[in-house]
Amino acid sequence: MRMMRIGIDATALPSRPVGAGNYIIQLIRAIAGSTMINEPVLDSSQPNGLEFVIFVQRSRLELLNVEETPNLHLIVLPDISPSMRLLWEQISFPKLAINQHLDLLHSLHYTMPLAYPGRTVVTFHDMTFFLFPHHHTLPKRYFFRFFIRASSRQAVALIADSESTRQDAIRLVGVSPGKIFTVQLGVTQEFRPMRDNTILQQARQKYHLPEHYLLYVGMIEPRKNLPTLLQAYAAVADQMPDHRLVVVGPKGWMVENILQQAGQFNISDKVYFTGYVEQVDLLLIYNMADVFIYPSVYEGFGLPVLEAMACGTPVITSNVSSMPEIIGDAGVLVTPNDSQALARSLLELINDPMERQRLSIRGLERAAAFTWKRTAEKTIAVYRHILGTI
């Protein structure tokens, strides 16, 4: 059988990956490590005859941390600024992709090179540009709305991070249901319960963390709904005097307005903003938290929820978009903009150690079903469906 050559565009990988950036890293690592491509498979029912070409910026190569094999090739490109990358994708990338004689090109971040004449699949991570355009800068709003629509028409298939995002794409962009496939994300084995108190305490000292704390992890931006979390915490902080609120994540758009909320609620001395944290430390911070809270108004998938569950941390999150799909019955679901309901759920959970233990165990069981190996296998199944090799 002739080897089918699949290109994967990883050039959207940022220097500090979160969310979609982690998807890019973990999908490629899972594909690179899969026996599906690295070992001959004689059973014709199994995916075989595939080779991959990964396009990546030079400074991001270390983040991917994959090596070339007979079935996986790296095309290392000069670094490109985020704004210029979008222009490069449309102007320069088509010729580069054509020269690689690909059977299929997978664009991992919403858009594809419209001038590329070959078969393409595009991953949609969410539909925030349509549902919450005011949460994005004006240039991003217009650019991504146009190119998401154009990519959805031109691609031969689309991948959505969750069934929620799939249904949003069908409803908002008019994607044919048979054209878009749900491929849920996974969680790495690094995210797990940690019992080594020495290592945990080193992380506590490094980030100046309190002994007991509630935790939020994610980009600090309007969509993540941090003002509601701050308001809910302020309402019950006096009833849980031993607990502080730790906010982990890089600063995004309109961050100043969000940071000012802590002062307005008179809890500035009780809220710890750590900034961006590397994954090796992040899993320790998850492990030391008493409760993880993720009140986002919308998520295409919501990786932090899964990461917290994988560490055995009880979770409170929103009852909208993809969050119920991820958490199932393994956490507490609340209406995202109801600060009173969030405050009640938080106080009840802090005061009920038995329920926290139950949610911890159930969360571990639930998270075990979400693996990047499964994500890679389902993605490869989409490739094979498109290529007609099943």
Image: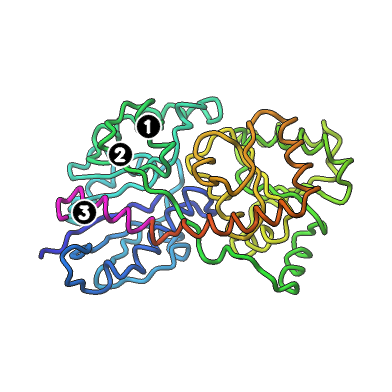
Residue 30, quarter of picture: bottom left
Rendered residue at 53%/45% (across/down): 328
- Residue 1 as seen in the image, left or right of residue 226: left
Q: Which residues are magenta?
A: 375-390
Residue nearest the observer in this picture, 298 or 145: 298
Could you tell me how far apart the alpha carbons at marks 3 and 2 are, in whole angstroms? 14 Å
24 shown above or below 193: above
Which residue does the numbered mark 2 point to in the structure image? 180
The quadrant of the rendering that contains the N terminus is: bottom left
Helix, strand or loop at label 1? It is helix
Proximity of marks 3 and 2: CB atoms separated by less than 8 Å? no
Percent x, y of residue 270: 84, 45
Which residue does the numbered mark 1 point to in the structure image? 169
The amino acid beneath tag 3 is Arg
The amino acid beneath tag 1 is Ala
Rendered residue at 15%/63% (across/down): 3
Could you tell me how far apart the alpha carbons at marks 3 and 1 are, in whole angstroms? 22 Å
Proximity of marks 3 and 1: CB atoms separated by less than 8 Å? no
Percent x, y of residue 239: 88, 41
State which tag comes first along the sequence, 3 or 2: 2
